[in-house]
Image: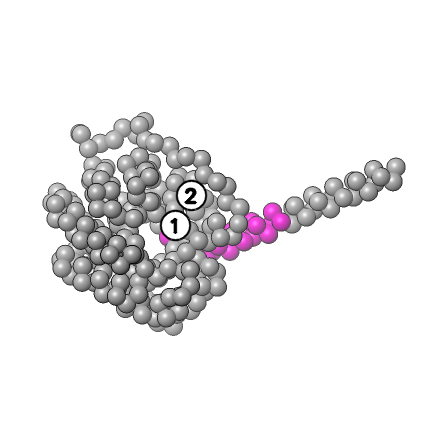
Amino acid sequence: MGNIVDPNSYIQPEERAPLATYQDVASRLELTLTRPDWNEEQVDAACRKALSSRLGAVVVRPSDVDMAVRILGASPVAVASVAGFPHGSSNTATKLYEGRDLLRRGACEINLVINYGKMLSRQFQHVETEILQMSESCHQAEKLLKLVYESAYLAEDLKIILCKMAKRTDSDFIETDAASDLPLLNTICKDVVKRKLSGPATLAGFEAAYTAGCERYGSPDAFAIAEEWRQVLAAREAAAQQAAAKRTANEHRTNNE
């Protein structure tokens, strides 16, 4: 039981600055483009739209990295790709070659899927050594490493161990697909490893993750979140203009009385 954290001891995230501009949301969005049923034309179009929408990053299939780098390489939109996708079951040497090849081809971020089988077998040294080697490769290239896991595969004690591995290996992010994991991740990784949530394509989902301490939010339809935020900002601006016009009218009426 030593690896179970009392939920009552979870660290609450610090109050964050309110979201005020388009880029406050867009720059934290990752567009996930790893579906197997998309052709290159669809990926190309999505990358160009991510550029015009000024998203934070796109996550593409390894075979699409060259194309994504041609489109986004000189822009603020980071090109990320996956190693060990989808279940982390590749041999370590295969994962490391994959990650280094992606970096060589211009990827800025590597999303490393942890080896679930090894974690469930409690072969922690194997998993940590793999992460450490990938972290060293990324940081030597001055790029980022994100550790990716699906919540349903790991019990709480294994999530805690993984968080500690992320800290010891200087991983830049740890990513989950369950908002319910964020209090635990915040408690263990606070101020050391940033958090990312892959969640529903809704502004409400993004805002909840942001409030909970996430720096990134991944979605296959990040454009829907960005567009919903544009509409919120437009409504705010219209309300502000209406309020200003009302104040001006009241002042004019007062001056004429």
Does residue 142 appear left or right of residue 22 in this picture?
left
**Residue 23 picture location, percent across and down:** 49, 53
In the current view of this chain or complex, which residue is farthest to the right?
257
Q: Quadrant of residue 138?
A: bottom left
SS under mark 2? helix
Front residue of this view, candidates 157 and 253: 253
**Residue 236 among those drawn in magenta:** yes
Rendered position, 65 above or below 20 = below
| Residue density around tag 2, few if under 14, some if 14–19, many if 20 or more, within 10 Å | many
The span picked out in magenta is 216-237
Q: Quadrant of residue 42?
A: bottom left
Tell me, yes or no, if residue 85 can be seen here. no
Q: Quadrant of residue 249?
A: top right
Q: Which mark is residue 241?
A: none
Q: Which mark is residue 217?
A: 1
Tag 2–tag 1 contact (CB < 8 Å): yes
SS under mark 1? strand
Does residue 235 appear left or right of residue 123 in this picture?
right
Reading the image, the residue beneath label 2 is 210
